[in-house]
Image (spheres, grey):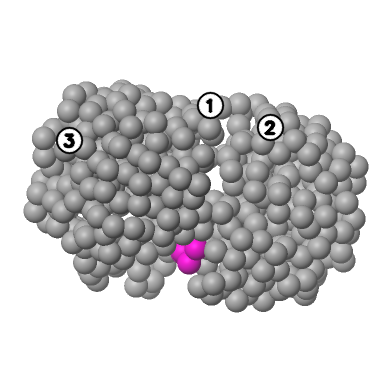
């Protein structure tokens, strides 16, 4: 251990996000979209945010200069870079590569003013405990819908010998020596799986994690750590066995394509009746969404790393139930609801992952969608057309759903608070403009 610096699938809810400071000009940005133009052309899919963030945190596990390629330039990746810099890392976050030097970490505190804006900041907790035995990490924020507790993160670390306490809103660990342990996730959790995997690679002895998440971001994180000297077996299954090692080599990797961004573009082509080709994506990671889009009447051709989609004149209604990977992703529920809002017939959309991930429903209603909420199920009665109106974004995927709806709505739609989009999508408006959409970013 380095010397410490000075200092089961179920319904869930999530805490409200504390937005960035009002002095941030991006808060005042809005998108003005004039609908009715079918999308046409080719679009390059960016690196996956949900893969990049844990890998960035994993650089804390060992000193050295780490190179991460294809990191998307997002508000969230910049926030993670800021967190790492607060800990003493030196960061170069560029268009082609992100270089992180973790040789001289000078602090083990991830402060509230950064962590409150992005839940994934909690990923630094396990690596700090594994490398230094000490950590002081603020309880995280998140998107503005319901609480997602961090109890699985804390329970798993406790099973590995970390005596953690909550002190004035901070998770605090002192003089921790992580030891191998067996831990069963009573619910599938992507974040907690990544957290415990990173902690376990430098713990003493063997750790067995059961009922882990299967998302590609998790498998890729394990592959990256193994290439650095970790000993993780069972990747791609519900059980991981991790033999702790004393040292790791610095990370040198390329971040995988963002499957949620790719699926969002597929839905954009479907709702506009357009035809586009996605470059640099993995169709295998999108099988559930592709199947549902085909049910709506889309024609989809998948190659090794490209997908071409042609949308129907009007989509057919479909029923959707979200589930952990490889099921239909909860991160595509809002976008699919936008598509179903103009479908022929009635769709039933159920989110089994989060009870209240429906802040987009009243905003879609402002555009003319007919949606009735019953608990965690939305009944969507498709209408022939939507009408432009002022709406407000509330989280990353809700923002994307409003953009999709605006692309087909008659007239002009103004979407406020689009800093949420910038948290999770790299230049989404610019990419859509290149595909023929009429979009203007304005300062409100």
From which residue to which does the magenta span run? 72-76
**45 relative to 324 in the view: left or right:** left
Q: Nearer the viewer, residue 148 or 409?
A: 409
Q: Would residue 37 be seen by someone viewing this image from the given angle?
A: yes
**348 relative to 291 in the view: left or right:** left
Q: Nearer the viewer, residue 238 or 44?
A: 44
**Of callouts 3 and 1, the N-terminal one:** 1
Q: Nearer the viewer, mark 3 or mark 1?
A: 3
Does the segment drawn in magenta span residue 298?
A: no
Q: Would residue 117 be seen by someone viewing this image from the given angle?
A: no
Quarter of the figure with the C terminus: bottom left
Task: Name the residue tied to disc 2.
Answer: 237
**Of callouts 2 and 1, the N-terminal one:** 1
Task: Name the residue tied to disc 1.
Answer: 10
Q: Residue at x 30, y 37 (%)?
A: 299
- Residue 393, horizontal then vertical, whole percent: 30, 52
Q: Nearer the viewer, residue 144 or 186?
A: 186
Between the C-alphas of marks 3 and 1, the distance is 34 Å
Task: Name the residue tied to disc 3.
Answer: 314
């Amino acid at each position: 251990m380095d010397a410490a610096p000075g200092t089961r699938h179920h319904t869930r809810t999530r805490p409200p996000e504390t937005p960035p400071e009002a002095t941030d000009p991006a808060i005042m940005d809005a998108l003005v979209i004039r609908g009715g133009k079918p999308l046409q052309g080719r679009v390059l899919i960016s690196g996956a945010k949900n893969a990049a963030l844990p890998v960035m945190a994993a650089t804390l596990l060992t000193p050295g200069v780490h190179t991460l390629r294809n990191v998307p330039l997002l508000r969230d990746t910049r926030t993670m870079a800021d967190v790492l810099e607060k800990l003493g890392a030196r960061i170069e976050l560029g268009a082609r590569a992100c270089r992180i030097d973790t040789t001289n970490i000078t602090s083990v505190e991830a402060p509230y003013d950064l962590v409150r804006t992005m839940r994934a900041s909690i990923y630094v907790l396990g690596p700090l405990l594994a490398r230094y035995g000490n950590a002081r990490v603020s309880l995280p924020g998140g998107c503005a819908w319901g609480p997602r507790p961090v109890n699985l993160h804390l329970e798993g670390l406790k099973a590995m010998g970390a005596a953690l306490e909550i002190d004035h809103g901070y998770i605090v660990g002192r003089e921790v020596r992580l030891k191998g342990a067996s831990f069963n996730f009573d619910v599938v959790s992507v974040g907690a799986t990544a957290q415990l995997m990173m902690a376990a690679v430098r713990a003493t002895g063997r750790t067995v994690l059961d009922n882990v998440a299967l998302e590609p971001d998790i498998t890729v994180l394990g592959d990256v750590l193994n290439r650095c000297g970790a000993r993780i077996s069972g990747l791609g299954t519900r059980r991981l066995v991790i033999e702790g090692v004393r040292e790791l080599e610095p990370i040198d990797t390329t971040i995988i394509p963002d499957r949620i961004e790719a699926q969002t573009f597929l839905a954009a082509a479907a709702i506009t009746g357009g035809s586009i080709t996605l470059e640099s994506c993995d169709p295998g990671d999108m099988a559930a969404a592709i199947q549902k889009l085909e049910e709506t009447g889309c024609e989809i051709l998948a190659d090794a790393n490209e997908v071409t989609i042609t949308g129907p004149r009007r989509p057919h209604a479909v029923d959707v139930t979200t589930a952990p990977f490889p099921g239909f992703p909860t991160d595509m529920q809002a976008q699919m609801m936008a598509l179903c809002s103009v479908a022929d017939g009635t769709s039933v959309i159920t989110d089994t992952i989060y009870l209240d991930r429906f802040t987009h429903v009243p905003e879609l209603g402002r555009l003319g969608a007919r949606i009735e909420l019953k608990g965690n199920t939305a009944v969507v009665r498709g209408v022939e057309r939507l009408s432009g109106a002022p709406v407000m974004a509330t989280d990353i995927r809700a923002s994307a759903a409003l953009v999709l709806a605006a692309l087909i709505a008659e007239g002009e739609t103004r979407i406020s608070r689009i800093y949420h989009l910038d948290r999770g999508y790299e230049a989404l408006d610019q990419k859509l403009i290149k595909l023929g959409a009429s979009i203007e970013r304005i300062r409100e």
